[in-house]
Amino acid sequence: MLAKDSTSHKIAQRAAQEIKPGDFVNLGVGIPTLVADYFQNDANTVFLQTENGQLGVGPSPMPGTEDLYLVNASKLPVTEMIGASYFSSADSFGMIRGGHIGVAILGVLQVNRLGQIANWAVPGKAIMGVGGAMDLLVGAKKIIVTTTHMTKDGKPKIVDQCSYPLSGTRKVDLIITDYATFSVDEEGLILEELASEVTLEQVEKNTDAPFRQSATLKIRSLD
Amino acid sequence: MKKLISSQEAMALIKTGDTLMVGGFGLVGAPLTLIYALENAEHATDLTIISNNLGEPNRGLGKILRAGRVKKAIGSFFTSNPDVIEYFQKGLLETQLLPQGTLSEAIRAGGAGIGGFYTKSSAGTLLSENKEVREIDGELYVLEKPLHANVALIRAFRADSLGNLTYYKSTRNFNPMMATAADIVIAEVDELVETGDLNPEEIITPHVYVDYVVRSEIKLGGARVG
């Protein structure tokens, strides 16, 4: 588990600000999973869907109370929220492809200048897994990407052209990194927000794709 | 109960060269008792296995792979079993990767008399290479064919004497579709009840689909009971 003050948690905390009461949300593996810790759901008005067949996913169980037969798509134990339901994989992906899930929060390997993503395969390695990545990308009404701005080797993840295979042609709606937040329109990326600890120059230097600056560029607040 | 058989009797229904559907998302909802019996059913080789994953290293279907009896795997996420990558790279295993929603819908189609369907998933990606892509109302869709099997090994929670099935929480996943898409359907269940004991509203798989029922002896976590 990552430390509470880590980069991943800050990205997740920012992404949680995008979730509103009444939303149906699917959280991908990795940083997206952490988002569940950061939005207020005391009134049970946000409904998490997991593609292995549950709507109304509740918080992680208390240690010792796990049910091995109740897991999310990351195969981690979860619980039932009041009003939860179960369904088959075919029904679950019908729900996803059919546009009934409002928000999908996805991790990525790369994002290109148009806002298209690569999040399922690595070139030069045998392609052995795709899971629900492509179905979520084509189906969710709004796609939010959460990712570190740089790879572990210090290379930009936002690039002109993806060198990794694309997950689909659909452009995502919002890209949230530890450096910045970008929206996406027909022409490409728009810088909407800077994290408080980075400068515009740092974002420009570490982003390999062109982007425009929003007229209302903000400094990120996690309060 | 006329459909109740042992896991060994179930294995006699599987032949070399068969295509099997096996339920489960990872090991959750996988028919572990039947998979364990399959490991010992050495007469059945050259198998094509349709399942979301191919188990984990030497767990679940991973055991059948290590026994060298899987010819081809059709699924959506093999990454959880590094053995699959190794066998594939050595040329010992064919694989067919489908988006998870396409896999589940192809099984549903196979059981529902649907000759194929168009989905947006994978359009414009490596996974739609060599597949028919058609523009429908301005969007690209990929033609996917139905999947069928000789035998489906599925996991349910309760079965009544007729073979009506209910499921438990996250174990449902691919099982209800697989119950419809094979010539012979064998359901491993935790509990057997009398016909009439299940509320008709809670039955997810009607007994018309179920040929045989096997009592589950292996629970998740590996404990062997009974």
Image (cartoon, grey):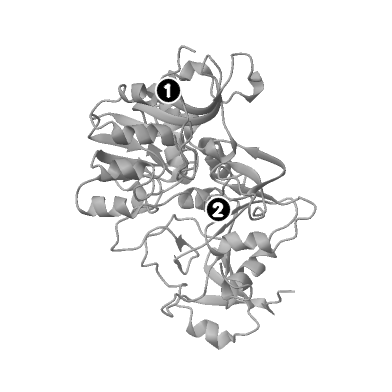
- Count all numbered tags in the image, as a single digit: 2
Compute the Cα span from label 1 to label 2. 35 Å
Q: Look at the image and tell me whether residue B96 can be seen.
A: yes
Residue A102 picture location, percent across and down? 64, 50
Mark 2, Cα crowd under 10 Å, few <14 / some 14-19 / many 20+, is few
Q: Residue at x 39, y 39 (%)?
A: B51
Q: Is residue A56 above or below residue B43?
A: below
Q: Quadrant of residue A38?
A: bottom right
Dot label at residue B113? 1
Residue farthest front in this picture? B226
In the drawing, does residue B15 fall left or right of residue A220?
left
Report the amino acid beneath label 2: Leu
Q: Residue at x 42, y 46 (%)?
A: B99
- In front: A175, or A68? A68
Residue B128 picture location, percent across and down? 35, 47
Question: Do pointers 1 and 2 mark residues of a single chain?
Answer: no
Residue A104 picture location, percent across and down? 58, 55
Residue A66 picture location, percent across and down? 61, 49
Determine the chain carrying the residue at label 1: B
Q: Secondary structure at mark 1?
A: loop
Dot label at residue A76? 2
Report the amino acid beneath label 1: Gly
Q: Is residue B84 above or below residue B209?
A: below
Residue farthest right in this picture? A43
Q: Look at the image and tell me whether residue B117 can be seen.
A: no
Determine the chain carrying the residue at label 2: A
